């Protein structure tokens, strides 16, 4: 077949990415004084060709800040800046680069870049009722960080991620964790074709820059990737499995908790094992008791000659379609040969349906007599046809069904009897029935290839819904323990080869149920050529890894050096970093790309040496200042006439706030930690828990890479939520407090000295005179000024008395005990002081008299017009019901309702409120407190007269309900000043 025009051999041969990597010599340039290494010659040659010149070199403060963020994702400390400024030696900056490359923080920063490519997450995505967390995802993350810190050769890094299980590792098994690269993707409800597609995608786009998965359903529209090549790789990954018992990578991080973990795991394993075995036995017994139904359905289904109709027939009879298919297949194997049990079945089945009654008596008599010594019939089967002949195949199936049911019953009884004897006398369990004829029938049901002896994964289909739910719950509890217990040892999420490799077929139009031609497991023809050899060893994963990591592969080195360049300059030499195919963006500096790729290979694939080469180049050390003329000629800075100013990404921003506030926790590795909830973790963000399905809004707000698929690069958006987070987030407020309260700043005697130190910590520079003047004016004006009082919470929960004469609440007393779901007077009901009064999210219970009415109080945060909606409900037929009132502190009674075993709408359309006014929802017991539980969770809509209804805000008593909450303390003057410094563009951008 002819491929699409863009993938014809001539175009492929001429495409830059498929050509061998060259070793280009640096070009000659006119300005021989500019440049520190060969990179600069390639950049300068392009600039000179367009009549442009490079920008000046950035100042030393900018260089150390840029380098520190580039290599570690953190700001430099004031001491590091001061030491660099004081060092006037020519090798001063090289020393900075070497120090940063040797820091553990380097691996945390560059490991996170790779985790974007690897679509890392700590959860599986949507998995219905399974445990969502990957128990050992962190071991892959820690492997990646360690590999970058140790400068593991990148080609070895690739091979370990694809096939570490097939390498000679010696005593150190930690590289096995590398295979999380393959196994940490989405689970697609355990749909294997989709899981394999995800693995092909992360390998092909992540390592090779090719969109191979576009060939899943048809030949690639643009690149030389036929569907056959896709399924060649599919066969590699389909020949692998994830073992249930994962290999250990070492001992527990907390040895004292290890025995506790083992004991709890054994307990949960036993519970799971016992439940599964019990339910499997029950399901198989029920299935075997219906063997007659299965035989009849197999007989009728085979005549339908349509698998879908056979399946529908099975489901109609509440039988498992898979078991029916197994019976059809097994009976076909026995057809045409004498079978002591099934020869009568085949004879009756061969009788014409309309003449069945004519043939049946002769057949029944012949089998009942059982006189053929050379072809004997099992006597129990023969006895089943003594007397009245069967009238139809349905009756034949019923007779067989009774025979098999009796044999299985005897076997179950024998097993139970032997278990009792075993417990008392240690008698060995039986393996046959005493009666040989019954044993022959039992063997049909229990033999290894019996249609009624299913493997574990098929037995699960027989479970009812409650059993399946319970089984998943027990499995989830076991996996939850692995994921959360501090004593759980680290394990590797490996793949291993199946005993027999899988030979794939092309799925026609991508449909697994439409297999096409067979394809061998082998590498891509675009790289290896048409005469490539199929993989020979097992799945071929190791051979695939070595083909990708080969120095002769034209793509791998180019792809990774382009990724490195992208993170240093903000844009790659190729602007489509995961697509080097025919539709890719061509490289801006193709010779430079080849030079860097060749350099990486020649330097034993050392990424640290590549970083050093780039950072010591004049191109990287340029200022980021703009030039209006150049900006018109080259608005995207593709020619690299200046450095690109870059905004901190999410991890850099969060880690910087922690570092500047003095709260950064540099503990390395281990289980992922929550980055969102309070108390806020001080760990580096790379160690944060990444939830694949429900990625927190904070992560999305700051453009965190989606873990659903391999991410080539992050895109910087500017949205209001980013500013709102920096202004209002409790996390940022906490860092502002910490920043202002650092001892080395707080203990400064002079205001100007304290301001200077704050500036140096945040911006790595002192304030200029105008900044210092403004800061002093701000701080002196607020000296001694007490912080503003925090606003009260919108809802409070208490009790009191309604005064009918004034139409207002007399006194309001707070309830002080919270159970976790209810506010009440004490830890028990009724409370000795206030009785039964209590309030929950949806309702509550009034106290014993009119002095103890339950009151849910709302406080207006601003002036406006409130409207109220809700339903007051009393369920019980007993007692005399309850009375509910809406009471405004300004206007008095706004509405009242009485309900007994009934409900009423409680709408109040307009109540004028001023800031600080209260609206009370009062419920009393009327005559007595018997059976007075009620439901009432009103909503309040508040519209401000000067903003209009479009800006109406809603409070929902049920959704807003909460327990004790510490009110946020307003910032003092120094803390406000510190927060202003943290919010600035100067901190959030790197020049």
Image (cartoon, helix red, strand yellow):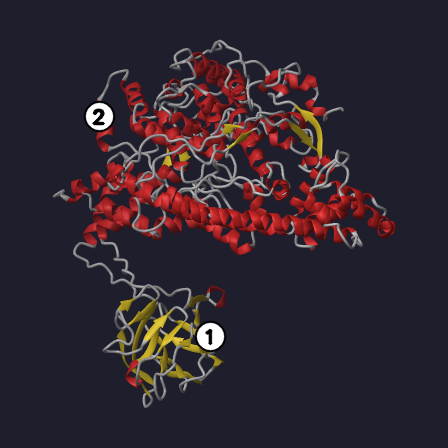
Residue 730 percent across, percent down from the top left: 32, 52
Badge 1: residue crowd in 10 Å (few <14, some 14–19, many ≥20): some
The residue indicated by pointer 1 is: 870
Residue 173 percent across, percent down from the top left: 38, 25
Q: For residue 256, which quarter of the picture?
A: top left
- Residue at the bottom extreme of this rendering: 805
Rendered-image quadrant of the C terminus: top left
Of the numbered discs 1 and 2, the one sitting upstream in the chain is: 2
| Residue closer to the observer: 849 or 990 | 849
- Between disc 1 and disc 2, the foreground one is 1
Q: Does 357 appear above or below 39?
A: below
Circle 1: element type: loop
- The circle drawn on residue 83 is 2
| Residue closer to the observer: 287 or 96 | 287
Question: Residue at (22%, 58%) from the top-left corner?
Answer: 787
Q: Does 12 appear above or below 882?
A: above
């Amino acid at each position: 077949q002819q491929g699409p025009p863009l993938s014809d051999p001539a175009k492929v041969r001429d495409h830059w990415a498929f050509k061998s990597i060259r070793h280009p010599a640096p070009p000659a340039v006119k300005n021989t004084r500019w440049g520190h290494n060969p990179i600069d010659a390639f950049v300068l040659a392009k600039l000179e060709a367009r009549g442009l010149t490079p920008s000046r070199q950035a100042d030393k403060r900018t260089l150390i800040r840029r380098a520190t963020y580039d290599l570690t994702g953190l700001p430099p400390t004031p001491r590091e800046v001061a030491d660099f400024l004081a060092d006037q030696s020519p090798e001063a900056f090289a020393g900075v680069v070497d120090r940063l490359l040797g820091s553990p923080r380097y691996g945390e920063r560059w490991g996170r870049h790779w985790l974007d490519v690897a679509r890392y997450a700590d959860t599986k995505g949507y998995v219905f009722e399974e445990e969502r967390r990957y128990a050992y995802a962190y071991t892959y993350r820690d492997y990646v960080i360690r590999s970058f810190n140790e400068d593991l050769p990148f080609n070895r890094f690739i091979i370990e991620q694809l096939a570490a299980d097939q390498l000679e590792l010696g005593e150190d098994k930690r590289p096995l964790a590398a295979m999380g690269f393959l196994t940490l993707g989405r689970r697609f409800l355990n749909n294997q074709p989709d899981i394999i597609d995800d693995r092909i995608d992360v390998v092909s786009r992540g390592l090779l820059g090719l969109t191979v998965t576009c060939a899943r359903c048809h030949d690639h529209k643009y690149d030389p990737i036929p569907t056959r090549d896709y399924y060649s790789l599919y066969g590699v990954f389909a020949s692998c499995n994830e073992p249930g018992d994962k290999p250990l990578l070492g001992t527990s991080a907390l040895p004292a908790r290890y025995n506790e973990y083992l004991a709890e795991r054994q307990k949960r394993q036993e519970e799971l094992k016992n439940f599964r075995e019990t339910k499997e036995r029950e399901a198989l017994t029920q299935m075997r008791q219906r063997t007659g139904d299965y035989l009849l359905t197999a007989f009728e289904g085979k005549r339908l000659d349509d698998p879908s109709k056979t399946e529908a027939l099975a489901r109609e009879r509440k039988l498992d379609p898979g078991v029916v298919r197994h019976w059809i297949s097994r009976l076909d194997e026995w057809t045409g040969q004498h079978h002591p049990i099934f020869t009568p079945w085949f004879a009756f089945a061969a009788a014409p349906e309309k003449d069945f009654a004519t043939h049946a008596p002769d057949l029944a008599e012949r089998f009942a007599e059982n006189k053929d010594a050379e072809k004997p019939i099992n006597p129990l089967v023969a006895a089943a046809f003594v007397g009245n002949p069967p009238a139809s195949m349905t009756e034949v199936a019923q007779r067989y069904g009774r025979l098999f049911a009796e044999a299985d019953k005897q076997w179950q009884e024998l097993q139970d009897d032997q278990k009792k004897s075993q417990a008392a006398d240690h008698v060995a369990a039986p393996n046959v029935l005493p009666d040989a004829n019954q044993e022959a029938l039992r063997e049909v049901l229990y033999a290894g290839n019996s249609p009624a002896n299913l493997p574990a994964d098929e037995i699960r289909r027989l479970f009812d819904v409650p059993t399946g739910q319970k089984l998943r719950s027990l499995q989830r509890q076991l996996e939850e323990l692995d994921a959360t217990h501090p004593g759980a040892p680290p394990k590797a999420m490996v793949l291993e080869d199946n005993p027999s490799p899988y030979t794939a077929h092309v799925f026609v139009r991508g449909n697994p149920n439409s297999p096409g031609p067979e394809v061998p497991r082998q590498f891509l023809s675009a790289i290896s050529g048409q005469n490539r050899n199929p993989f020979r060893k097992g799945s071929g994963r190791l051979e695939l890894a070595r083909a990708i990591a080969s120095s002769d592969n034209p793509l791998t080195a180019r792809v990774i050096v382009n990724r490195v360049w992208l993170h240093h300059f903000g844009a790659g030499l190729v602007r489509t970093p995961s697509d080097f195919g025919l539709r890719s963006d061509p490289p801006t500096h193709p010779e430079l790309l080849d030079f860097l790729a060749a350099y990486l290979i020649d330097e034993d694939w050392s990424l640290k040496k590549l970083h050093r080469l780039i950072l010591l180049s004049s191109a990287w050390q340029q200022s980021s200042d703009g030039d209006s003329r150049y900006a018109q000629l080259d608005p995207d800075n593709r020619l690299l006439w200046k450095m690109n100013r870059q905004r901190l990404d999410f991890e850099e921003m969060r880690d910087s706030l922690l570092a500047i506030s003095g709260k950064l926790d540099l503990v390395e590795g281990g289980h992922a930690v929550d980055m969102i909830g309070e108390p806020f973790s001080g760990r580096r963000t790379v160690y944060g828990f990444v939830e694949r399905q429900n990625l927190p809004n904070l992560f999305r707000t700051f453009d965190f890479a989606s873990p659903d698929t391999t991410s080539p690069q992050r895109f910087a958006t500017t949205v209001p939520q980013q500013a709102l987070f920096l202004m209002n987030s409790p996390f940022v407020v906490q860092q502002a407090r910490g920043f202002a309260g650092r001892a080395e700043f707080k203990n400064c005697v002079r205001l100007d000295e304290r301001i200077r130190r704050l500036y140096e910590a945040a911006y790595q520079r002192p304030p200029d005179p105008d900044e210092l003047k403004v800061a002093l004016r701000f701080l002196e004006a607020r000296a001694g000024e007490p912080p503003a009082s925090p606003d009260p919470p919108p809802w409070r929960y208490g009790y009191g008395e309604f005064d009918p004469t004034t139409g207002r609440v007399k006194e309001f007393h707070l309830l002080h005990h919270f159970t976790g779901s209810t506010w009440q007077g004490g830890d028990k009901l009724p409370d000795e002081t206030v009785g039964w009064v209590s309030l929950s999210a949806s309702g509550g219970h009034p106290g014993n008299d009119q002095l103890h009415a339950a009151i849910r109080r709302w406080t207006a945060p601003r002036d406006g017009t409130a409207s109220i909606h809700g339903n007051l409900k009393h369920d019980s037929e007993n007692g005399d019901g309850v009375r509910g009132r809406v009471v405004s502190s300004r206007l008095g009674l706004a509405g009242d309702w009485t309900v007994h075993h009934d409900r009423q709408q409680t709408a109040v359309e307009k109540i004028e409120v001023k800031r600080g006014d209260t609206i009370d929802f009062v419920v009393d017991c009327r005559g007595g407190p018997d059976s007075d539980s009620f439901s009432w969770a009103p909503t309040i809509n508040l519209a401000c007269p000067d903003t209009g209804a479009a800006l109406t805000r809603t409070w929902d008593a049920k959704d807003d309900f909460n327990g004790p909450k510490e009110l946020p303390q307003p910032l003092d003057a120094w803390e406000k000043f510190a927060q202003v410094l943290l919010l600035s563009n100067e901190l959030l951008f790197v020049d």
